[in-house]
Amino acid sequence: MFVSHLIYTGGIVLKNLSYLMMAFTFVSASVSCAKTPEIQPKTNTQQQSIKQQVFVFDEVYQFNEGLARVQKDDKYGYIDKTGWIVVDTQYESAQNFFDGLAVVKKNNKYGYIDKTGRTIINFDYDEASEFFEGLALVKKNGKYGFIDKTGKTVIDFNYNHAVDFFEGLARVQKNDKYGYIDKTGRMIIDFNYDDASDFFDGLAYVQKDGKYGYIDKTGRVVTKFDYTDAMDFSDGLALVQKDGKYGFIDKTGQAVIDFKYDNVSGFLDDLALVYHNEKYGFIDKTGRKVIGFEYDRAGEFSDGLAVVYKNDKAGFIDKTGRVVIDFQYDEANGFVDGLARVYKNDKFGFIDKTGRLVIGFDYDEANNFSEGLALVQKDGKYGYIDKTGRLVINLAYDNASNFFDGLAVVQKNEKWGFIDRHGKLLTITY
């Protein structure tokens, strides 16, 4: 159950539910026969076809641009937030809507539909992606090209591999080499590289002869090809590896933080978590050691405190390295909204930033708070508590998810449904 990375990120395993979210018209959980919600007038034929159920779909995904994709009997469609199926479950696969269009698959080919279900771009492609910067990457007859929102081919199908446009350029591959094109398809940077990244902050890392360096958007090499590993620039610094050790360089290739660390996280709140001589500590952007290398495990700072481990026990430190909460927990998570989930003697509870136990060690499993409620499990049943520890939604479900956009997925008797923050079940109309 526990993940022994830099920070414990475990929680309730949701059995393929991490992506599941949808919204429907409310119906009380205590009412066995739901009242029909007010709907728009329908024809006699339409009225005869209307059905209402709480548990309908085999899979459901979170809402995006007002619609959620759903699956029933191995076919995908879309619902709106009133619970109406606005696009019938008819597609072999489907993606979220972006910029008003969604990629869907039918008869083993991909095309694009709008939010009414109307086909906007025909089902002509072996692969397709969402639109980025006005163009979409598609594949046809084994080659990649780009189309616009009318379906017009803007960049011909010439490439063995390609990636979406970022910062006006797309990396493309031909004959096992990478280069970059602009939105007209004009070659901006030739096929010179064995590996390449997208442009971020005006620079991209590229690989040649087994080493990485950085180029600008004209193709000019701005750093030497000295690195065995490289990351994107952020706030003017990039994490790179040389001779098996990590350090940071600026945009001129100058080493700002020496290559002496075994592993490094990115900077967060001006501090980076680093691993050196089998211990964790923290450095600032000048490379100065702010918190010494004395911890067996550590997490990044959250709400001003970081989880650290010594002698198999977790505690919390502030940004000066002062121990704020003693080393007493078997596991701990970072603070979220003023509370941290902690684990002791095989039970979960929650503490505040002074270390005071706010919610006792009563639960077999628990997630961090989301939208003011935390998912908890006891004796095999799931429910929700508020920040005072009050059980707001009873421990009645066989499985459940965190709340997202006011709704949570719950399972009972091998069927899935949805509840609001008051515990009311939701139903759909179709």
Image (spheres, grey):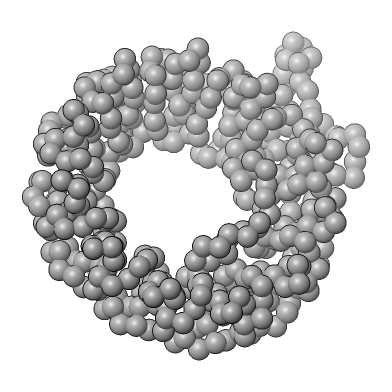
Q: Residue at x 32, y 71 (%)?
A: 261
Position of 103 with respect to 218 (left or right) is right
Front residue of 197 and 352? 197
Position of 96 with respect to 333 (left or right) is left
Tell me how many marks there are. 0
Residue 420, percent across and down? 74, 49
Task: State whether residue 207 is above or below residue 318.
Answer: above
Q: Residue at x 31, y 36 (%)?
A: 164
**Viewport quadrant of the C terminus:** top right
Q: Can see residue 209? A: yes
Position of 354 with respect to 259 (left or right) is right
Q: Quadrant of residue 288?
A: bottom left
Q: Quadrant of residue 23?
A: top right
Front residue of 152 and 16? 16
Residue 388, percent across and down? 76, 72
Q: Residue at x 51, y 39 (%)?
A: 65
Front residue of 275 and 27? 275
**Viewport quadrant of the N terminus:** bottom right
Residue 274, percent across and down? 39, 72
Q: Residue at x 64, y 70 (%)?
A: 331
Residue 351, percent across and down? 68, 76
Task: State whether residue 339 is above or below residue 14.
Answer: below
Position of 3 with respect to 110 (left or right) is right
Q: Can see residue 425? A: no
